[in-house]
Amino acid sequence: MGYGDNKLRRKEAVGMEVLIEQYIREMKLAAGLNRQRVSEAWDVVSGAARYTVDRFFRDGILYCTIGSSVVRNQLYFQRTYLIDKINEYLEKDGSFIKETSGPPVKNIILK
């Protein structure tokens, strides 16, 4: 194995944030990490973390099971606002890797 066979040979200097993002994409870790980031965004933005029994994110839809019917009704009427704020939060989050064009969270389903 000669020197030219080394796939990791550096061609140009790259920042650590670029290397980490590239590693996450190549190892196909982005979807799982993004689900975690969306869950955290929900907790921070909604303020309903203690009432959220379960959450699941797939195909741009955030499904949340809320343990209190009163809180669920309040959140229901704030869905558009929450979607906008969650997407803003994710835009500022350096750990979130945007995989598609458009906003990451397109809808919220409350159960």
Image (spheres, helix red, strand yellow):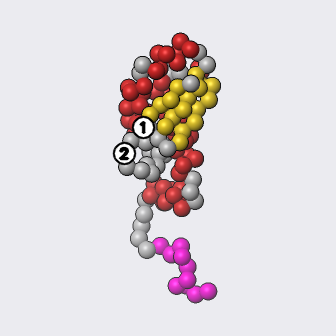
Q: Main secondary structure of the magenta part?
A: loop
**Seen in the image, is 80 located left or right of residue 49?**
left
Residue 106 seen in the figure: yes
Please tell me the numbered disc located at residue 102. Answer: 2
Classify 10 Å Cα crowding around label 2: few (below 14), some (14-19), many (20 and above): few
Residue 16 seen in the figure: no
Residue at 56 percent of width and 24 percent of height: 111
Q: Check disc 1 and report the residue beneath it.
A: 106
Name the amino acid, label 1.
Lys
Q: Nearer the viewer, residue 76 or 39?
A: 76
Q: Nearer the viewer, residue 102 or 8?
A: 102
Residue at 47 percent of width and 15 percent of height: 74
Residue at 44 percent of width and 34 percent of height: 107
The secondary element bearing badge 1 is classed as: loop
Asked if the magenta segment contains residue 58, the reply would be no
Q: Classify the position of the N terminus by image quarter.
A: bottom right
Name the amino acid, label 2.
Gly
Magenta stretch: give its range. Answer: 1-10
**Seen in the image, is 66 located left or right of residue 80?**
right
* Residue 30 drawn at (x, y percent): 53, 51
The secondary element bearing badge 2 is classed as: loop
Task: Place residue 85 in its image quadrant.
Answer: top left
